[in-house]
Image (tube, helix red, strand yellow):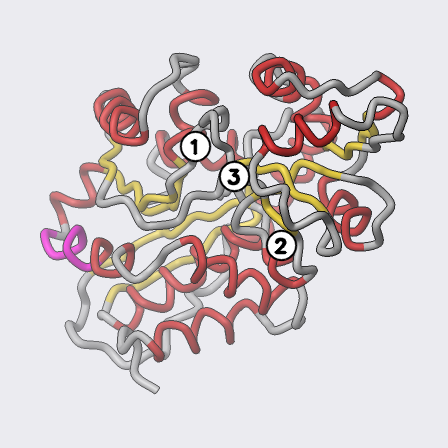
Amino acid sequence: MTVMNVKKMKQWTIASCAAAMAAWVALSSAPALAADAPTQQANAGRIVVGGKNFTEQLVLSTLTSQYLGALGYQTVLKNGLGSTLMRSAQVNGELDVVWEYTGTSLILYNHVNDKLSPEQTYERVKTLDAKQGLTWLNESGINNTYAIALPAHADPSIKSISDYAAWMAARPKQAHLFASDAEFAGRSDGLKPMLAAYGIPFKRRDLKQMDPGLVYTALHNGQVEAGVVYTTDGRVVGFGLHVLQDDKHYFPVYQATPVVRTAVLKAHPQLEKQLNALAAVLDTPTMTALNKQVDIDQAPVDKVAHDFLVSKHLLPQ
């Protein structure tokens, strides 16, 4: 998620926006990755595929480009973008197909903070984004949302966030170091209301803010007791982290979904069915495994995408 790569909803600084713009310029002339792929329908048209700047989005955008290229589209891949820049580019007609997260569109782009069910969230963003000329296709099974994780060696009886809150409360004199990235720690719907919702008795000195990637390392090394992670991050599996059940359903759903400019769907009537077929073979465990291949096993994104598509018979060998 994406996950919510996110895979999600980072606060943009001037420096990060400048870096993202540089990536956009550098990628704007990049050739289609799937230009040499065997085709099933010749000259289907030019499709620009966009993607964000974290592993999951690099994988999703790359496999989409390869898949559509094999179907005969002239694909152009432009990834490495931040959420805000990618959204703006698609609304402005510079990107045709992206993978977006329902929670990201609801909260970040449309500024809706209502607590909605997954079904309500999808229907709301589908309706709101239609006004921007964007069509949400079928959701995949990927939910890249926030989660609380413990190190692999943690007490196995702690299965939910409520269990963890009770475990902490029973040990008031014990130090409880909790890691979070600065973005989640500072959000109005982030760390503080989550702690309040679950009654987690953290003291200020217990909270450690760090880079999102360092949270996984700190958990893996046992340097912190718990931390905020993303559910589809490959390091969750790679480091054997113990993800707790969000039993009060505090975290929003970030369901990864193909979003296409409506005008492009009208120009290419088969595209909706084709992208829905791709979404149908993706879920959270699958995406986590793909992310692990890149982040832990150090496999190239192009190869990970290609091998997955071949395994699902969506790409010739």
**Disc 1 on helix, strand or loop?**
helix
Q: In the figure, residue 138 lies in which quadrant?
A: top left
- Which one is nearer the viewer's eye here, 74 or 247? 247
**Residue at the limit of the structure toward the front, as seen here:** 170
Q: Position of residue 148 (x, y in %)?
A: 62, 37
Residue placed at 27% from the left, 73% from the top?
Answer: 314
**Could you tell whether 252 is left or right of 312 in the image?**
right
Whole-angstrom CA distance, mark 2 to mark 3, is 14 Å
Q: In the figure, residue 5 lies in which quadrant?
A: top right
Q: Position of residue 11 (x, y in %)?
A: 64, 25
**Residue at the limit of the structure toward the bottom, as seen here:** 317
| Quadrant of the snapshot with the C terminus | bottom left
Label 1: which residue? Answer: 87
Label 3: which residue? Answer: 245
Nearer the camera: disc 3 or disc 1: 3
Label 2: which residue? Answer: 236
Q: Where is residue 23 in the image (x, y as percent from the top left)?
A: 61, 46
| Magenta segment includes 1 | no
The overriding secondary structure of the stretch rendered in magenta is: helix
Whole-angstrom CA distance, mark 2 to mark 1, is 28 Å
**Disc 2 on helix, strand or loop?**
helix
- Which numbered disc, 2 or 3, marks the residue that appears first in the sequence? 2
Badge 3 crowding class, 10 Å Cα cut-off, few under 14, some 14 to 19, many 20 or more, is some
Nearer the camera: disc 2 or disc 1: 2
Q: What stretch is highlighted in magenta?
A: 269-274
**Disc 3 on helix, strand or loop?**
loop
The amino acid type, in three-letter code, at marker 2 is Val
